[in-house]
Image (cartoon, rainbow, N blue to C red):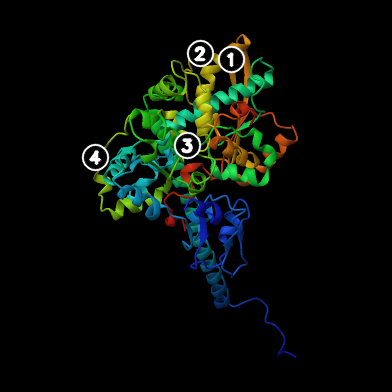
Amino acid sequence: MHIFAEKAGMTRRQFLKGSGLLAVTVIVSGIFAKIGIDAFAAGDNYIAQRAAGLYSLDEKMALRKSHENPEIIEIYREFLSPGEEKYLSAKAHHLLHTKYGKNIPAFIEELKAPGQNENSHEAA
Amino acid sequence: MSTAVLNNGVIHVSDQCKACDHCTSICPTGAIQGRLGEKHHIEIRKCINCGQCLINCPFGAIDDFSMVNERIRKALDNPHQFVVVQEAPAVRVALGEEFGLAPGTNVKNKMYAALRKLGFDKVYDTEFAADLTITEEGTELIHRVFNALGVPGFEHAGPLPQFTSCCPAWVKYAEDNYPQILPHISTAKSPQQMFGAVSKTYLAEKLSLDPGTIYSVSVMPCTAKKYECDRPEFIASGYKDVDAVMTTRELAQMIKTAGIDFVNLPDERADQFIGSSTGAATIFGVTGGVMEAALRTAYEVLSGEALGKVDFQAVRGLDPVREAVVEVPVKALGGKTLPVSVCIVTGTRYVAPIIEDVLADRSNYHFIEVMNCPGGCINGGGQPIRRDTY
């Protein structure tokens, strides 16, 4: 009978062996977790750094509003709406706007045969 | 050939694929097929060419279609072609990473110098076209708002809310999945395409060139821009708006192949007529930037007053969905204040509920910015790959 009887408690040696294994497991998994967290943080970090780069460039620019760009003023006054600064002028609409999805095939035909359907651009 | 991108897509899985399945969790449209342990492939019809799988593949097993040898080098070598180049805002704060500089370092002026050394006849800037996008798209928004308020003379303007149209991955996603939402997308072309159209018309006039000899190249942080440039409708000038696109990575490779000592290049400026820009254009490269740029201009146009503080902190940040309300006094309404309600989405996987709200008439937004890549173009599929994050 005594062959199957378990000895109560554990020896000092068994305790040290068990707690040592547990400690090593905790430390090793902690190191892996730290590597994972750092990699994740680094992954986000370079995106934030690139964003910060653009915002600091914006702050350093002499002009910070699109409609104040002198070359934008010039392209409207000389080319897109001669003599004035008219956004969405007919020429601007023709060159700078487009259509989507199922409207594209007819739009391409219209661009290839100009003049036949000039006022259709208002419908989106 | 120009149909290559449209028929075969920009993004391809190579034989290096280890079938780890990481890309399927990144893809915003579920376009990547293949079981764990099986080489994956991309379903062209679902793929929006964003390249997020490419920059996130741990094995570098995903490639993008290159136009460098077949188009760009041939144009540069052809003495009869006048080759002009534009570079997107996000390129200038990431290109330096390929030459050992920290992310976010501004290398704009060295980039202009490098492009001249590579043989481009004139070096301009996509930021000019971003400013042009704001005057066009911002005005379109104002017209839609006036139409909704019943102001006479704006009956032909489209419905609210208006969605941005700069991101070709987002536009293809909408066309593929939500055709009913298309009237809400701004009709303004993206800055890349606007630049192309202007380069073959206004610039040709200014430089007294035959537009047929102008070859328009762009440097983009984006793989979807390659698909966009080959879409067949971009021919309003009588010529293809943009002839070829290279990514930030491909420009770095060209600079290295040419043996150019990039970090020691002198600082140069962009060329005249379509090369200057404002800070509003610079922030197009980060999520919320198009919104902020549009608000700066729309506020001044609507109120007739100068904006004291141009920073709209409320629209900044890297969260995938953000919203804000901006009070704008409207001169045309006798100074009545209009609360302009805006939303910013970065990551196409987050946009469906917002579209559903618009289609069900539950949305109160006036203007919605959508960028496919998390963080905006700065994290685009054409940007330097950060292997240090694995």
Q: Which of marks 1 and 2 is nearer the N terminus?
A: 2
Q: Earlier in the sequence, mark 3 or mark 1?
A: 3
Quick check: do tags 4 and 1 share a chain? Answer: yes
Q: Tell me if B180 is positioned left or right of A37 in this view.
A: right
Residue for point 30% across, 55% down: B257
Q: Distance from label 3 to label 1 (Cα)?
A: 42 Å
Q: Which mark is residue B305?
A: 2
Bin the neighbour count of mark 1 within 10 Å (Cα to Cα): few under 14, some 14-19, many 20 and up.
some
Earlier sequence position, callout 2 versus callout 4: 4
Residue A92 percent across, percent down from the top left: 50, 26
How far apart marks 1 and 2 lie (CA) works out to 9 Å
Disc nearest the viewer among 4 and 1: 4
Label 1 sits on residue: B329
Q: What element carries label 4?
A: loop
Q: Name the residue under label 4.
A: B266
The residue type indicated by label 4 comes to Pro
